[in-house]
Image (cartoon, rainbow, N blue to C red):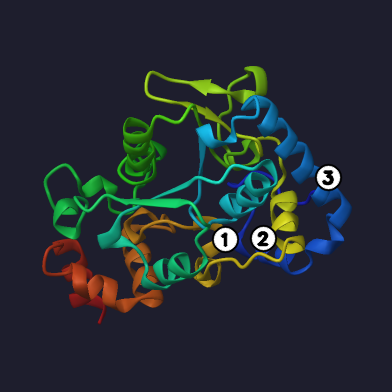
Amino acid sequence: MRRVLKAKSAYSNDDVARVWQTITEYVTEEEADRAVEEAAAETRLVLDGRTDDAVYGWSGGKDSIALEVVMERAGVRRALLGTLPHLEFTAYMDWVNEHQPDGLTHLGNTAITPAWLARPGNDRYLFPTNSTDGYRWTMLGTRWAQHRYQEEHKPRLQIYGRRTADGNSIPATDYGIHRTSRLTSYCPLRAWSHELVLAVIHYNRRPIPPVYDFPNGWKTGTGSWPGRRVGDRDASFAETYRIEPGLLQQAAPDLPAAADWLRRNT
């Protein structure tokens, strides 16, 4: 196995696109299958065979697709997706509806709208410029869904595709298990490289969503349009408009920042 992609902050969109196109030069099918089997075996061990008492996070992003392969091998069938229905890209949601795994629960936070972003104090979540606001933005979608699902269904474990190579913090506990007052989580892909994730997707012949064909798609991944960070606010608006003009046109009546950008640039 060869690694050329370093930390997420260090590689470019083109770097990942090149590796994806030539992934067989970096990871063999045997290496990918062995990693899946090892992660699946560890998952079964952590769950003590109770695979029906867990749910895994699925967004259709590359890490969640690789995780889906592992969960299928481990026998975990329940999956969870959290979205912001008023702020998602149409092509992404169309893809999700076509390719979502069996057993998926989709929870959408409909309270987060363009008008919500326009309220005093919420402006910082429009293309967040720092990691704190970026994290708080995820609390409104992905993590909101995780907490709501936990309250309603009470699984013993939530399983995520988080990895240290992506900059995620994984606790130094047995199997990297993280316990909070609200839920317990586990990340079986925590030590996987970027190349291994891509290889598992490739060798298992899994489709990837159109977000990876968007400008900067490999850097930003899945997620609602206000959460993308690709430069300053004008640049972020411009890229959103390039991907799906209608999103800004729909938002403009309730979001003055979008209306102002459209007035100055269209």
Nearest to viewer (mark 3 / mark 2): 3
Q: Position of residue 205 (x, y in %)?
A: 71, 66
Residue 76 or 88: which is nearer the viewer?
Answer: 76
Label 3: which secondary element: helix
Q: In the figure, is residue 153 to the left or right of 55?
A: left
- Relative to 232, say whether 211 is above or below: below
Q: Are marks 2 and 1 in contact (CB under 8 Å)?
A: yes
Residue 201 or 49: which is nearer the viewer?
Answer: 49
Residue 238 or 245: which is nearer the viewer?
Answer: 245
Q: Where is residue 226 in the image (x, y as percent from the top left)?
A: 32, 57
Say whether disc 2 or disc 1 marks the residue closer to the N-terminus. 2
Q: Mark 3 highlights which residue?
A: 34
Q: Position of residue 31 (x, y in %)?
A: 85, 49
Label 2: which secondary element: helix
- Relative to 8, say whether 41 is above or below: above
Nearest to viewer (mark 1 / mark 3): 3
Say whether disc 3 or disc 2 marks the residue closer to the N-terminus. 2
Q: Residue 16 — which label?
A: 2
Amino acid bearing label 1: Trp
Amino acid bearing label 3: Arg
Q: Residue 65 — which label?
A: none
Q: What is the crowding at mark 2: few (fewer than 14 residues within 10 Å), some, or many (at least 20)?
A: many
